[in-house]
Image: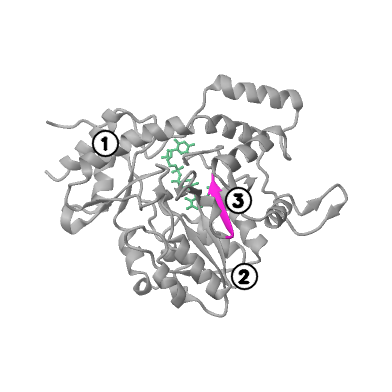
């Protein structure tokens, strides 16, 4: 049977939109108080609500995840070289470059697509000050392995958990590992504030330093202690976040249903590989990712991506191109593709399929039909 294209574009994601009347109640309160930013009551409520939801000791909200990462690097005093992954969104290596730090790209693990712990140690030099690892697609890095290496060499660890809102390892929130963890609350993320982010840390001293950096280094009305930046989340973002937070559990339940359909339809197709949840990990259902082996499937990832577009399906090649192949980083010694064989292969195989709670099961089945029909 001929499959017809979707009548409207089907995107990789759509943001959770809370009921307008619920959001309006919060907006009315902001209008009443005329406090639009600089830590009002919405901000306070979201900061403590998320601290509890994410099971982290301390949390600071930010206007986006990228500024949060910049502040994390500054708060930990990182400099010279930081080891990171090339398989990530541009923000990860860019915050290093913006901070005058050289990104040193380490290859990734073929299964998890996260930084390969076995390869980190060989990249450490006297100039290395830290590790910036990414919990790609919401599944955790080998946090124990990274901790051992960091402790052995006196390195700081920052996790980019932009994708990992709500992921847990053995009941512990993902933001409880490393020195600092960054969350992104961009509209494309599971939880969002349109634009926004947060840092979680284990110690109150570091939280105070982060909060100082987030607000220009200002302490009180008459003291500016350090060169800070403007990283503040405003009241309207925070109000949206509070309304979205109430929708998160229902969103995850819907996504689980969709994921189960994808898995049951795609798991036995030769050449299509699905991500598996590692043991002891509570997944957050942030992305549905397939990897396509051209040799076994008969079509390349790029073929599949193009064919999907003919059906109005806008799958995404996260993360292609690799950070190490951007013109601004490809001359770095660690960017040599010979040193990054897994990342270079994986970046040509991955495809993120449409995945959000509002997507109906019929559409997911149709996306699977399209994928399976491509080979005929
Ligand atoms: N680290 C990692 C690992 C990250 O993935 C990110 C962000 C960061 C750091 C930085 O955090 P932030 O500073 O952003 O807080 C999107 C996001 O723009 C980006 O924030 C995100 N990662 C990345 C994974 O995805 P694009 O270029 O794919 O976005 P865009 O505009 O093409 O959106 C994708 C689809 O989502 C659209 O086709 C339709 C849908 N969409 C998007 C938006 C913005 C909507 O339905 N509504 C919307 O408002 O990067």
Q: What stretch is highlighted in magenta?
A: 179-184
| Residue, far right | 222
Mark 2 crowdedness (10 Å alpha carbons): few <14, some 14-19, many ≥20: some
| Frontmost residue, 206 versus 31 | 206
Residue closer to the observer: 132 or 59: 59
The picture places residue 267, in percent across and down from the top left corner, at 22, 46
How far apart marks 2 and 1 lie (CA) works out to: 46 Å
Observer-nearest residue: 180 or 304? 180
Residue 224 percent across, percent down from the top left: 82, 55
Q: In this orientation, does residue 84 appear?
A: no
Q: Which of marks 2 and 1 is nearer the N terminus?
A: 2
Is 201 positioned to the left or the right of 359 in the image?
Answer: right
The structure residue drawn at horizontal position 49% and vertical position 44%, both measured from the top left corner, is: 165
Q: How far apart are marks 3 and 2 (CA)?
A: 19 Å
- What residue is shown with label 1? 261
Q: How far apart are marks 3 and 1 (CA)?
A: 34 Å
Residue under pointer 2? 79
Q: Circle 2 sits in a helix, a strand or a loop, which is it?
A: loop
- Reply yes or no: does residue 66 show up in magenta: no
Q: Where does residue 82 sit, x and y in percent of width and height?
A: 54, 69
Q: What element carries label 3?
A: strand
């Amino acid at each position: 049977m001929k499959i017809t294209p979707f009548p409207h574009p089907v995107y990789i994601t759509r943001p959770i939109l809370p009921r307008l009347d619920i959001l309006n109640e919060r907006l009315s309160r902001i209008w009443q108080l005329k406090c639009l930013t600089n830590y009002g009551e919405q901000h306070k409520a979201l900061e403590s609500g998320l601290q509890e939801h994410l099971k982290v000791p301390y949390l600071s909200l930010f206007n986006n995840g990228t500024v949060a990462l910049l502040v994390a690097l500054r708060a930990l005093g990182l400099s010279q070289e930081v080891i990171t992954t090339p398989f990530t969104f541009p923000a990860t290596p860019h915050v290093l470059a913006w901070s005058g730090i050289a990104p040193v790209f380490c290859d990734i693990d073929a299964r998890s697509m996260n930084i390969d712990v076995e390869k980190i140690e060989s990249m450490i030099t006297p100039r290395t000050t830290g590790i910036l690892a990414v919990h790609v697609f919401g599944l955790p890095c080998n946090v124990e392995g990274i901790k051992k290496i960091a402790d052995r060499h006196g390195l700081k660890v920052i996790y980019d958990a932009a994708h990992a809102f709500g992921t847990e390892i053995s009941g512990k929130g993902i933001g409880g590992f490393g020195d600092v963890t960054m969350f992104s609350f961009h509209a494309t993320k599971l939880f969002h504030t349109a634009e926004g982010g947060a840092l979680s840390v284990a110690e109150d001293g570091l939280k105070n330093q982060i909060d100082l950096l987030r607000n220009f280094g200002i302490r009180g009305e008459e003291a500016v202690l350090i060169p800070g930046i403007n990283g503040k989340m405003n009241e309207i973002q925070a109000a949206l976040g509070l309304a979205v937070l109430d929708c998160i559990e229902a969103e995850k339940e819907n996504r689980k249903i969709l994921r189960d359909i994808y898995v049951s339809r795609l798991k036995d197709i030769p050449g299509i590989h699905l991500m598996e949840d590692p043991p002891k990990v509570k997944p957050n259902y942030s992305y549905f990712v397939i990897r396509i082996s051209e040799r076994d499937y008969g079509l390349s990832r790029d073929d599949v991506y193009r064919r999907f577009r003919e059906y109005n399906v806008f799958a995404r090649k996260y993360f292609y191109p690799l950070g190490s192949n951007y013109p601004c980083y490809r001359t770095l010694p660690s960017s040599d593709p010979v040193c990054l064989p897994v990342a270079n292969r994986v970046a040509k195989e991955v495809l993120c399929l449409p995945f959000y709670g509002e997507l109906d099961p019929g559409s997911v089945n149709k996306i699977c039909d399209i994928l399976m029909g491509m080979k005929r």
